[in-house]
């Protein structure tokens, strides 16, 4: 059992304790000694732990590909990644086993517990837009591609260092002024391919991960 | 009338029950942990957490008021 699952189970147990305490509080008189003992637990202590565990689950528990693909708009990305015929960067990383697990998160690390505040705010913005359905397909990347997500793994490797142009534009790569994708192709299907109504969109939506998304 | 008393008066006026707030927040959290879909996640982030915070705030105000009445504060 991994730590995320363990924390999830602990969270569920803590919530049940909270619910029992809350019911207990509602059955006791406001001035009884029992109320004074359990009310701080029900209203302050247990909620503190529940919020901490819940936020851990939001930030760290959602790193699996199956978690990412729970949002409808992510299905084309995940299906393309798992398509052996695809030549996008994500698909090449996946089929060659360069990233063994948490494939989405490994390249989108900013969302994790150690990520930047801006990435967290972006995550909340995506959550609001998705929940309220105030987005349009195809979704578009807002901001600048962060080369650090690539360089975290590739920097210093023999294959990377052997390419002369990597040294010539090293500063531009480090500061993301030149994107890795300029030379190495698209990381995911293009917005045109992800436009509803196109043949490619229908193909991308039929992949294996669509079924994964529907699993409980 | 102190600020905490005014807030508690408003809370009583609008019949805001911290027990109901906390119970619904617990239920939303449990839902999110069992089914980590976008909707339960949004409800946990934008509804359950503010509910917890508000209920805790009301409880602290009540404790402060009681301590004031007893002359401890």
Image (tube, coloured by chain):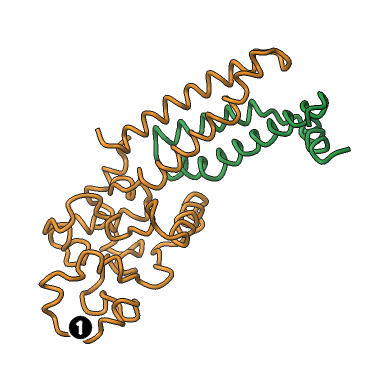
Chain colours: A orange, B green
**Picture layout, residue A90 above or below residue B60:** below
Q: Residue furthest bottom?
A: A168
**Front in this rendered view, residue B33 or A84:** B33
Q: Residue furthest front?
A: B72
**Front in this rendered view, residue A134 or A169:** A169
Image quarter of residue A29: top right
Residue at the spot x=30%, y=68% of the render?
A148
Residue at the spot x=82%, y=35% of the render?
B5
Residue A59 spot, x, y in % from top left:
40, 47
**Label 1: chain letter:** A
**Front in this rendered view, residue A187 or A131:** A187
Identify the residue under disc 1. Answer: A167
On the rendered structure, is A126 left or right of A102? right
**Picture layout, residue A95 above or below residue A42:** below
| Total numbered badges shown on the rendered structure | 1
Disc 1 crowd rating (10 Å Cα; few below 14, some 14-19, many 20+) is few
**Looking at the rendering, in which quadrant would you find the N terminus of chain A?**
top left
On the rendered structure, is A17 left or right of A165? right
Image quarter of residue A31: top right
Residue at the spot x=22%, y=48% of the render?
A208
Residue B48 spot, x, y in % from top left:
55, 38
Residue at the spot x=39%, y=51% of the render?
A113
Residue A2 spot, x, y in % from top left:
26, 36
On the rendered structure, is B23 left or right of B67? left
Label 1 element class: helix
Q: Residue furthest right?
A: B1
């Amino acid at each position: 059992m991994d730590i995320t699952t363990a924390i999830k189970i602990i969270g569920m147990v803590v919530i049940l304790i909270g619910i029992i305490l809350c019911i207990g509080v509602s059955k006791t008189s406001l001035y009884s000694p029992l109320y004074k003992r359990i009310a701080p637990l029900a209203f302050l202590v247990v909620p503190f732990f529940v919020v901490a565990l819940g936020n851990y689950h939001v930030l760290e528990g959602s790193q699996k590909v199956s978690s990412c693909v729970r949002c409808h708009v992510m299905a084309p990305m995940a299906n393309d990644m798992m398509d052996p015929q695809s030549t996008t960067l994500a698909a090449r990383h996946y089929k060659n086993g360069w990233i063994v697990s948490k494939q989405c998160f490994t390249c989108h690390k900013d969302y994790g517990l150690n990520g930047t505040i801006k990435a967290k705010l972006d995550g909340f913005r995506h959550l609001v837009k998705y929940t309220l359905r105030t987005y349009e397909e195809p979704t578009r990347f807002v901001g600048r591609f962060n080369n650090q997500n690539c360089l975290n793994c590739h920097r210093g490797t023999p294959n990377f260092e052997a390419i002369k142009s990597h040294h010539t534009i090293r500063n531009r790569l480090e500061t993301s002024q030149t994107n890795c994708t300029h030379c190495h192709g698209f990381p995911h299907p293009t917005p045109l391919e992800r436009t509803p109504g196109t043949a490619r969109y229908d193909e991308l939506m039929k992949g294996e991960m669509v079924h994964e998304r529907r699993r409980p | 009338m102190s600020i905490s008393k005014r807030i508690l008066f408003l809370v009583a006026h609008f019949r805001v029950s911290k027990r109901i707030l906390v119970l619904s927040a617990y239920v939303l959290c449990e839902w999110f942990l069992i089914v980590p879909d976008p909707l339960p996640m949004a409800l946990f982030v934008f509804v359950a957490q503010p509910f917890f915070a508000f209920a805790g705030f009301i409880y602290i105000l009540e404790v402060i008021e009681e301590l004031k009445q007893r002359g401890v504060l």
